[in-house]
Image: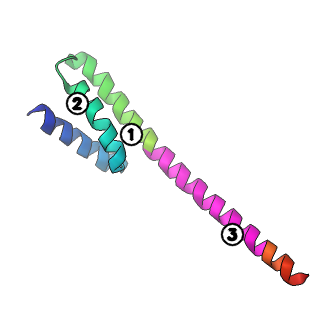
Amino acid sequence: MGKESRCEKILAELGERYALEERFVKKLTPILEVILSDSFSDEERVPLLEELAATCQRDQMIRKTMGEVREGVDALFSRLREMILRMHKED
């Protein structure tokens, strides 16, 4: 299996597992290509690939958390808006 197809396969697997965004995958591609290059032995490569997978997992968790934060902030501002409108109606 060639370097490119191996890289694409790993990125596809990580993308599916962690629902990676395309822009993140584009940034990971050159990093993964270096990891898969002949510059590293298999013994050196394994922990790097594990760290890459852990990074993808953290990215997924951060995106999920940020989505929840956005929903919370939206709900807060919606409630504040309702309260302000109600206060102005009472005046």
Q: Is residue 28 above or below residue 83?
A: above
**Residue 16 in magenta stretch:** no
Q: CA distance from mark 1 to mark 2?
A: 16 Å
Q: Earlier in the sequence, mark 1 or mark 3?
A: 1
Secondary structure, mark 3, is helix
Amino acid, disc 2: Glu
Q: Nearer the viewer, residue 27 or 75?
A: 27
Would you say 88 lies left or right of 3 here? right
Q: Is residue 81 above or below residue 34?
A: below
Amino acid, disc 1: Cys
Instruction: Provide the residue designation for mark 2.
Output: 33
Secondary structure, mark 2, is helix
Residue density around tag 1, few if under 14, some if 14–19, many if 20 or more, within 10 Å: many
Residue 78's disc is 3
Q: Residue 90's image quarter?
A: bottom right
Residue at horizontal 53 percent and vertical 55 percent from the top: 67
Which portion, as a residue range, is magenta? 60-83
Find residue 57 and report its horizontal and vertical position in percent. Answer: 41, 40
Residue at horizontal 26 percent and vertical 22 percent from the top: 45
Instruction: Provide the residue designation for mark 1.
Output: 56
Find residue 40 and report its horizontal and vertical position in percent. Answer: 22, 17
Name the dominant secondary structure of the magenta segment: helix
Q: Residue 33's image quarter?
A: top left
Tags 2 and 3 in contact by the CB under 8 Å rule? no
Q: Earlier in the sequence, mark 2 or mark 3?
A: 2
